[in-house]
Amino acid sequence: MNFKIQREALLKPLQTICGVVERRQTLPILSHVLLVSDGEQLNLTATDLEVEIIASTKTESATAGEITVPARKFLDICRTLPDDCHIDFKIDGERAILKAGKSRFTLSTLPAADFPNIDVAEEGKSFKITQNALKSLVDHTQFAMAQQDVRYYLNGLMLELADKKLRSVATDGHRLAMCEMTAEVDSIDAKQIILPRKGISELARLLDDENNDVEIEIGNNHIRLKFDSLIFTSKLIDGKFPDYQRVLPQNSDKNLVLNREIFRQALTRASILSNEKYRGIRLLMDSNTMRIVANNPEQEEAEEQIEIEYAYDALEIGFNVTYLLDALNAITTENINIALSDSNSSCLITAVGEMAADCRYVVMPMRL
Amino acid sequence: MSNDRCPVFWPRAIIHVDMNAFFASIEQRDFPQLRGRPIAVTNGHRGSCIITSSYEARAFGIKTGMRLPEAKKLCPDIIQRPARPEIYAAVSTRIMLSLQDISPDIEVFSVDEAFLDVTHCQRLHGTPVRMANMLKKKIFAVSGIHSSAGVAGDKTTAKFAAKLQKPNGLTVIPPWEARQRLANEPVTALCGIADGIGNFLAQYDAYRCGDVGQLPIGILARRFGNLGRRIWLMCQGEDPDNVHTDVPPPKSMGHGKVVPPNTRNNEVLLTYFRHMSEKLASRLRRHKMQAQHFYIGLKIQDGWLSMKLNLAHPDNDASAIFKLCRYLMSNRWQHQGVFQIQVTALDPQPSDQQLELFTPQREEQQLRNAIMDDINQRFGELTLAPARLLNKSDMPNVIAPAWKPNGHRQTISLTQEKETLKKPR
């Protein structure tokens, strides 16, 4: 196999897939990328056995064949070659030779036949959604996923298909984020799937704010997405996601509307003097004012005051300020709505306006 | 006593007080027949390791950490005394509280040592030397125990000074003399510099404190970071460390126990693990803490067999911790002989601060634990405990050198205090 290709045509797909390659692994071949040419098109594949990304690009000339080369080194060479140069790649015995201008590199290879595929048990059923809608589902919720929790089913993003809607839900047991979009999902029975954390962070990187369609195929143990010139495949987490509907607050009797940016900035300032480890802050609401108070072990204190419309009983409630800020950063509208009931019950944060129903954020309080 | 009349205000004045042969002195105080006799305090009657000994015993060359049979060779008349940790804790608490009358800036350094920052008391009480005498008198008045004091301008020099005259001594190293007084002392004579740092300094031919001051500070900073910079200053009598008046939050909290050598019985080991789990859980609860990550270990012939295990949620329930011990026993232990066990909470944190979305709040379990804690608070540790502990070891509790009257270091509960202290004379 050999091919000639313009640097940029190779660099972009390589950068796209190389995020999947783990820096350390036990199987040497997992540090390689698979290159497959049909004489015209070049397919590049990277995998960590959980997530696989295939990117395709056009070559200038090529002969059919396949080989694997070390991913990181291949990427670094392409990245550091001068702009617009032409790369000449060919195989010589057990080595791959890469030439560009006056540069020449000899890379080790491993046989393409040894490159592992993600085993997809059966073809799944598919539906379509626009790329920006999918990006929105991921971006609005992924921050709430758990990290290395023993409840392994929380270390990922749950996608739910039901009632002509595609819904994403993430939670770490302390806060929960959910977002929903209309989608033509009639061809598939209502179901919930959980994508692993790594798959979600890669996917978030790949998705653009474009209006084109993404084809989503869902099987029993995998999800496959096709968009642009990419095929993204991820295994699913086999587990039961907790009943998130049950923890959406239903009986909040106190509603307040806040300017998102003013609230966000006040929280950010107050958080400087909160406990660095536990990040607790107190919100004290009373007749049309909200005070935000933070203390740290050094006995330092921050206090912020915001004028609000509040005609309920006084309430003092503590939160991890990071959870509030994460939710405020995910919402894009000018104002937000916070629904509260008492200092031991969760609060619900939503956008005010068109997006109101799309995204919901639930945060459990802290006892401070 | 020329220092006593010195009219100069010290820019910084630190006093280190150290109770002399603390545990042994309390035994001699309470049992007059022991006075003037060589005694060794051990853990119960069966313990053979000497926790501390009286000055009369030390005259024979007996040292802390020595085994009893070895001590008997040096001093056949040595008298073994079982430790009474609750009494020691109570006496220590009484002493430390009384020292606050002289300066509120007190750091309880261990069960029998404290640092006091008396810089701001000079106008009130007089010279630092006068205050050191007041402290020694105070300690004797409330406890009947003699102490040694070191007076200096920084903690390290004060601790060094306190060691110079024992028992019942008082040594003054004014800040302006500290550099010169330390210059010819070996670096390892300072508290906090042991063989590791000593060997590093020896590579640069720095054996005495004065040599260290000649080295560029960067050499120490590169190797030990901020600690290195502190050591460089310490060696010149300028230890910048403050007297820490609050107990910092614990980085870990654990209990361990020596088991009969070469124990291979699964049930016996589980009983020890249950015992340590109960102790750790109730200590976490006493300080309103919980933890999610635990170190569980077994000491066998070749070293420690251990695992770091996680709970689904932070907890302070003994059964939850014990389950992790069982996991280690069934997954790592292959019937090797065991010598010691350890259960440690690696991330103690305030309990039930962050409320959970999904966990059923464990109210029943918490209520049960609270009732058990109340009963044990009143009638003594483990009065109410799981049935398995009927077979637990009857080895008494050991008081840790790091014991403090406040905060999480209070491993010996003060509730069972039956102090036999006589009226101060």
Image (cartoon, coloured by chain):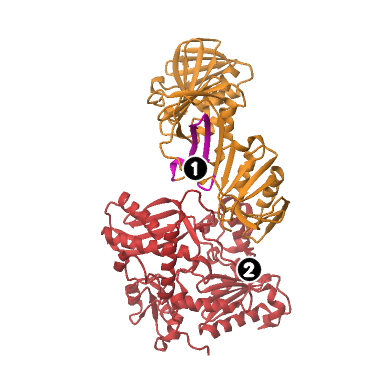
Please provide percent x and percent y for residue A326. Answer: 61, 43
Q: Nearer the viewer, residue A365 or A321?
A: A365
Q: Nearer the viewer, residue B106 or B249?
A: B249
Please provide percent x and percent y for residue A89. Answer: 51, 15
Please provide percent x and percent y for residue B306. Answer: 37, 52
Which chain is drawn using orange?
A
Distance Cα–Cα, label 2 vs label 1: 58 Å
Q: Is residue B80 visible?
A: yes
Please provide percent x and percent y for residue B409. Answer: 49, 67
Q: Is residue B216 visible?
A: no
Q: Callout 1: helix, strand or loop?
A: helix
Q: Callout 2: helix, strand or loop?
A: loop
Q: Is residue B228 above or below residue B154?
A: above
Magenta run includes residue B268: no
- Reading the image, the residue beneath label 2 is B154
Q: Quadrant of residue A102?
A: top right
What chain letter is assigned to the residue under label 1? A
Which chain is drawn using red?
B
